[in-house]
Image (cartoon, rainbow, N blue to C red):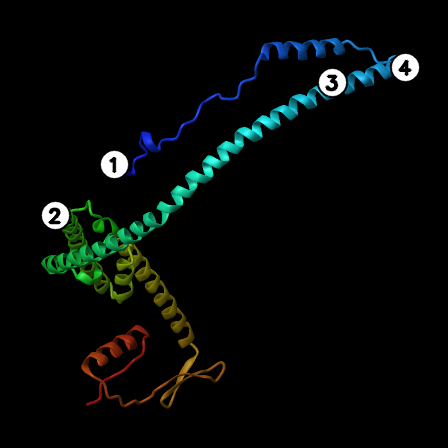
């Protein structure tokens, strides 16, 4: 690459501080004297003409200085602009090559990332079953696809993650068993409570919630029984029906149904009837 360096034969020569104001101190003194000479000028009706003339002379001096500044700056900047144009022209010859190399580098990086992703997925597929983990549920992290991340490091992180998930699954299974048994012991359907547990609710809260639900159910049942007893005081049996003696309304009737069900469905139906205080009997 030495041939691409800007060496002495192709170097850029320039001189710093090339702009020099000859006899600057003398010029500065002349300007200061002119400024001081007119600074004490008194403007009145008698001196108005002289004041205007003095102002015109000062403006002329200022314009002369400013024009000289602009002339020198333009000449100086012309060299700079010409230099910039030439150097930029050289840069534009290199830019397309740099862009091409960048694109090819990115393509190679993407190919390498895909190849590594396949290796990582193969490692996940191999390790997952050993920990009871479904490989499809393990996401590949972006940092694992970096060149700097070794397969040994990835294997260690996968192991730690799978052990943590294994422990969580075991704890969840234990918690599900605890909630299920407790709900059943209280005569409560466990499904809804188990779903809350899976969504992140803690066991102590659910146990207390089950107790509150049972208590509310018992209170409701006692209230219903009290109401039924109160209503029974003005009800009588008329044939197969029970009639309210105040309104004449049929409040209960005997209905005969013939059902074809499985043993499991029969058990669920029996629980429903008992829960709602509906009398029934099995007919052979």
Which class describes the residues within 10 Å of circle 3: few (<14), some (14-19), or many (20+)? some
For residue 58, which numbered disc appears in the image? Answer: 3
Residue on which the image places disc 4: 45
Residue located farthest toward the right when viewing the structure as drawn: 45
Q: CA distance from mark 2 to mark 3?
A: 83 Å
Cβ atoms under marks 1 and 4 closer than 8 Å = no
Q: CA distance from mark 3 to mark 4?
A: 20 Å
Q: Quadrant of the N terminus?
A: top left
For residue 152, which numbered disc appears in the image? Answer: 2
**Which residue is found at the position 43% from the left and 41% from the top?**
88
Circle nearer the viewer, 3 or 1? 1
Q: CA distance from mark 2 to mark 4?
A: 98 Å
Cβ atoms under marks 2 and 1 closer than 8 Å = no
Q: Is residue 83 above or below residue 144?
A: above
Circle nearer the viewer, 2 or 3? 3
Q: CA distance from mark 3 to mark 1?
A: 59 Å
* First along the sequence among labels 1 and 4: 1
Kind of element beneath mark 4: loop
Cβ atoms under marks 3 and 1 closer than 8 Å = no
Residue 281: give x, y in percent of width and height: 24, 84
Residue 113: give x, y in percent of width and height: 22, 54
Kind of element beneath mark 2: helix
**Which residue is found at the position 29% from the left and 80% from the top?**
279
Q: Nearer the viewer, residue 92 or 23?
A: 23
Which class describes the residues within 10 Å of circle 1: few (<14), some (14-19), or many (20+)? few
Q: Does residue 22 appear to the left or right of 64 in the view shown? A: left
Residue on which the image places disc 1: 2
Which class describes the residues within 10 Å of circle 4: few (<14), some (14-19), or many (20+)? few
Which class describes the residues within 10 Å of circle 2: few (<14), some (14-19), or many (20+)? few
Q: CA distance from mark 2 to mark 1?
A: 41 Å
Circle nearer the viewer, 2 or 4? 4
């Amino acid at each position: 690459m030495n041939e691409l360096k800007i060496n002495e034969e192709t170097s850029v020569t320039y001189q710093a501080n090339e702009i020099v104001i000859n006899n600057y101190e003398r010029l500065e003194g002349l300007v200061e004297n002119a400024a001081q000479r007119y600074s004490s000028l008194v403007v009145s009706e008698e001196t108005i003409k002289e004041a205007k003339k003095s102002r015109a002379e000062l403006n002329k001096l200022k314009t002369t200085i400013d024009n000289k500044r602009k002339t020198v700056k333009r000449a100086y900047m012309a060299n700079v602009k010409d230099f910039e144009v030439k150097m930029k022209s050289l840069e534009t010859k290199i830019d397309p090559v740099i862009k091409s190399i960048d694109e090819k580098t990115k393509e190679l990086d993407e190919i390498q990332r895909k190849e590594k992703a396949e290796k990582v997925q193969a490692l996940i597929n191999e390790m997952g079953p050993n920990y009871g983990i479904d490989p499809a549920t393990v996401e590949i992290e972006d940092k694992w696809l970096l060149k700097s991340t070794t397969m040994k490091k990835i294997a260690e992180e996968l192991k730690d993650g799978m052990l943590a998930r294994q422990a969580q699954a075991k704890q969840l299974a234990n918690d599900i068993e605890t909630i299920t048994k407790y709900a059943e012991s209280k005569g409560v359907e466990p499904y809804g409570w188990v779903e809350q547990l899976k969504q992140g609710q803690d066991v102590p809260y659910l146990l207390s919630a089950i107790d509150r639900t049972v208590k509310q159910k018992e209170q409701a049942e006692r209230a219903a029984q009290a109401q039924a007893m109160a209503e029974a005081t003005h009800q009588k049996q008329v044939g197969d029906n029970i009639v309210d003696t105040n309104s004449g309304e049929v409040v209960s009737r005997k209905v005969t149904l013939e059902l074809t069900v499985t043993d499991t469905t029969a058990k669920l139906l029996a629980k429903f009837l008992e829960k709602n205080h509906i009398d029934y009997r099995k007919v052979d």
